[in-house]
Image (spheres, grey):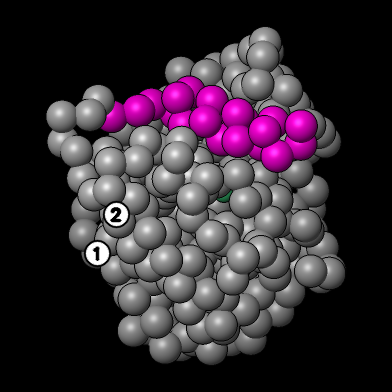
Amino acid sequence: MSYAKGPHDLGRGAFAWLVPSGHWGQSNSGLVRGEGESLLVDTLYDLAHTREMLDGYAPLTVEHPIRTVVNTHSDGDHWFGNQLVGGDGVEIIASAAAAATMTQHAVDEMVGLHERDGHIGEFIRPISVGFDMHGIVATPPTRTFSGRLVLDVGGREVHLIEVGPAHTAGDVLVHVPEAGVVYTGDIVFNGGAPLVWTGPISRCIAALDQVLALEPDVVVPGHGPLTDDTAVRRVRAYLEHVAVEATAHFRAGLSVEEAVSAIDLTPFADMTEQERIAANVLNVYEELDPTRPRSDRLEQFSRIAAYDAGVRR
Ligand SMILES: [Zn+2]
């Protein structure tokens, strides 16, 4: 999908900064501008990308400085750049569940993945080309919440709606009712396959239903170009398909690996990041079998990387 990098004016004080091509790590951010202050939705994966985004927004924020940052969730590509906007009385807000893992340990762990041998390193390094993880100092939220929070951003109402656990433990939607805009974080990927890190998958589907219930004119996905309900419904269809198929294969006694191979993704062949199926099926199996130990991010990446290596072989 081809779309322009940079700021997009969504009308009535809402903006988005889009980063093509929306693949791994190439995340979007949002800006809500009120009278005399602005709210930033997410920072980017590294300092250079975040600096470029802040510079791009500068003409919009010079008289309406960023006083609030909302991180939609705890994945690094949505908050590692926080140090460039934190401090100086700027409030950084996330759900309490997300904030719990927004630590220097998370930064170091991600850096560590790049240096690993084998499938994981071979997978992570190429998808991280163009990002520099050095010098990132974890800058966690200064304010957390659970459930819902309504903010006044210079006279503009912004609603934070916690929908996690879903993609991650503490996903948040940012809704600007007056502008008809929802910033979804990685509840919505437009162009890429969705990814269920935490789940369960039913919560990801419920989160998409919450987006649809807001009846937005514009949906700013975590990755990929702007959309309306089209990409939301498409991601929902993928997750429904995977949930139904993986459950049937579980009941039939197939292993996770067998189920991953057996699921026909032809109807979703246009989606990039097909390798995410490996983590998504694993998540369904863990939900259906409570005795199965819960995998960590390393295990999930390992399966994604092994799937990717298998396809390339
Ligand atoms: Zn992301």
Percent coordinates x, y for residue 276 in the rendering? 55, 46
* Residue 190 in view of the camera: yes
Say if residue 141 shows up in the picture.
no
Q: Secondary structure at mark 2?
A: helix
Image vertical order of residue 68 relative to residue 138, above or below: below
Tell me, yes or no, whether the highlighted magenta stretch contains residue 187. no
Residue at image mark 1:
148
First of labels 2, 1 by sequence position: 1
**Position of residue 224 in the picture relative to residue 292 (left or right):** right
Q: Quadrant of residue 169?
A: top left
Q: Decide if ligand 1 comes within 8 Å of the CB at mark 1.
A: no
Nearer to the camera, 22 or 138: 22
Compared with 61, 98 (above or below) is above
Which residue is found at the position 31% from the left and 33% from the top? 100
Q: Amino acid at mark 1?
A: Arg
Location of the C terminus by quadrant is: top right
User: Residue 1's spot in the image, x, y percent?
Assistant: 79, 69
Pick the front one: 245 or 168: 245
**Residues in magenta, as a range:** 294-313
Placement of 156 over or under 283, stated as above or below = below
Instruction: Check whether the beta carbons of the residues at disc 2 and disc 1 lie within 8 A of each other.
Output: no
Q: Which residue type carries mark 2?
A: Thr
Mark seen at residue 247: 2
Residue at left offset 79%, top offset 48%: 52
Front: mark 2 or 1: 2
Quarter assignment of residue 282: top left
Where residue 97 sits: x, y (%)? 28, 42
Left or right of 63? Residue 214 is: left
> What's the residue at 52%, 45% (across, down)?
261
Label 1: few (<14), some (14–19) or many (≥20) C-alpha neighbours in 10 Å? few
